Amino acid sequence: MKCSRCKAPAVVSLPSHHSAFCEACYLDFFTKQVEKGIRKQKLFTHEDRILVALSGGKDSLALVYELQLQGYNVTGLHIDLGIPSSSAPARNSTEAFCTKHNIPLLVKEMEKEGLAIPMVKERLRRPVCSACGKIKRHFFNKIALEEGFTVLATGHNLDDEIARLFSNTIRWDIPYLGDQGPALEADDEHGGFIRKVKPLWRLSEWETANYAFLRGIENHYASCPYSKGASFTFHKQVWATIENHMPGRKIDFYQGFLERGQPLFAQASEKQSDPLHPCQRCGFPTSAGVCGVCRIREALAEGQ
Ligand code: SF4
Ligand SMILES: [Zn+2]
Ligand SMILES: [Zn+2]
C-alpha cells in the first residue's frame, strides 16, 4: 500500500477518507483536520488562554500536544479522582508528559476537596459515574473561570461525539441535542459557564490513536475500576458496524446534525429547559436551587 499523497510506503490506512498515508503525510493530515475543526466551528484563536482537561489518556495528551505545536496558549488541568488503581498512573503519566513537553499543568485533588470518588461511591450507594462526571465538570468550569482562562478544551473525538449523539437521539433528549456540538458557548449571565470546545471532533478514536503512536505519546493508562458497562460502549460498537459498511458515514452524520439538526433542537430546547441561576451554596450555575456537586456534598454529610 502506498501513500495517497507522496507514494512512499503507507503506514496508516483510512477507509473513511479513501486514503492511506506515510508517517509524515499522516501527521500533516491530522494537523489539517484539527485546524479545519477549529476554523469551521470558530473554536478559538491564538489570543485565547486555553485550559485543556487532561485525563492522562491518549486523546487529551494528543490534543494538548497538537495545540501546542500549532502555537496555541495551552495549560493542562488534571483532576486526581483518588481512585486507588487508576488515578495514580493517570496522574503520573500526565505529569511526566507535561514536564517532558514543557506544558504548564494544574492538578486538583478530589481527596482534598472531600470528594475522593471511592468514598463518594461508598456513601452514595448508587452507580458513581454520574456523580463523578458532575464533579469533574464542576471543577473544570470553576478552575477555568477562577484562573482566567477564556476556553476549556477536552479531548472528545468523533466516536465520543457520535456515541453521545446516538444516545441523545434514541431518547429524543431535546435539551441535550440542542446543546451538543464541538463548541458550547460561555454563559456569564447565570453565574458563569466557561466556553467549552472539542477540537478533535473531526478525528476518530483510531485516527487519534495512530497520531499518539506516531508521536511517541506514552500513556500508562489503567482503566477505571468503576467503568464496567459504560453506556456509550455499545453505541460505539453499533457505529463501528455502520462505518464498516459505509466508510465516511460517521463524519457525514455528525456534520449533517451540526448543520441541519442542532440549530432546530437548540431553538426547541430554549422553550423547554429550566432557567439557570447561581447555586445557593457555591454560586455556580444550576437549574435547581442547589447545584449537583453541592447536593453530593450534602448527601455525603448526611451519610456520615
Ligand atoms: S468510569 Fe470512573 S472515572 Fe469515568 S466517570 Fe465513572 S467513576 Fe468517573
Ligand atoms: Zn506520504
Ligand atoms: Zn453549588
Image (cartoon, rainbow, N blue to C red):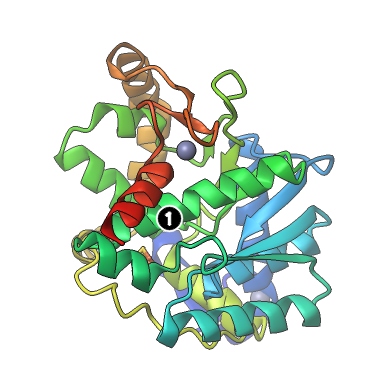
Q: Is residue 8 above or below residue 28?
A: below
Q: Residues within 10 Å of mark 1 (few under 14, many from 20)?
A: many
Foreground pick, 25 / 34:
34
Q: 258 or 115, which lies in front?
A: 115
Position of residue 238 measured from the top left corner of the image (x, y, whole percent) = 18, 61
- Queried on whether the Cβ of the residue with tag 1 lies below 8 angstroms from ligand 1, the answer reads no
Viewer can see residue 161: no
> In the picture, residue 74 is in which quadrant?
bottom right
117 horizontally vs 230: left or right:
right
Residue 284 appears in the picture as rendered: yes
Does residue 283 sit above or below 69 in this rendering? above
Q: Tell me what residue is drawn at x 47 percent, y 28 percent.
A: 280
Q: Secondary structure at mark 1?
A: helix
Give the residue drawn at x 40%, y 61%.
Answer: 16
Give, as a three-letter code, the residue at label 1.
Leu
Q: Is residue 20 above or below residue 193?
A: below
Residue drawn at x 34%, y 64% as measured from the top left: 120
Q: Is residue 3 left or right of residue 300?
A: right
Residue 73, x across and y down, in percent: 82, 53
The x and y percentages for residue 229 are: 19, 70
288 horizontally vs 103: left or right: left
Q: Quadrant of residue 247?
A: bottom left
Quarter containing the C terminus: bottom left
* Ligand 1 falls in quadrant: bottom left
> How many discs appear?
1
Q: Residue at x 45, y 53 (%)?
A: 135
Identify residue for label 1. Answer: 158
In depth, the one of 65 and 256 nearer the eye is 65
Q: Residue furthest top?
A: 271
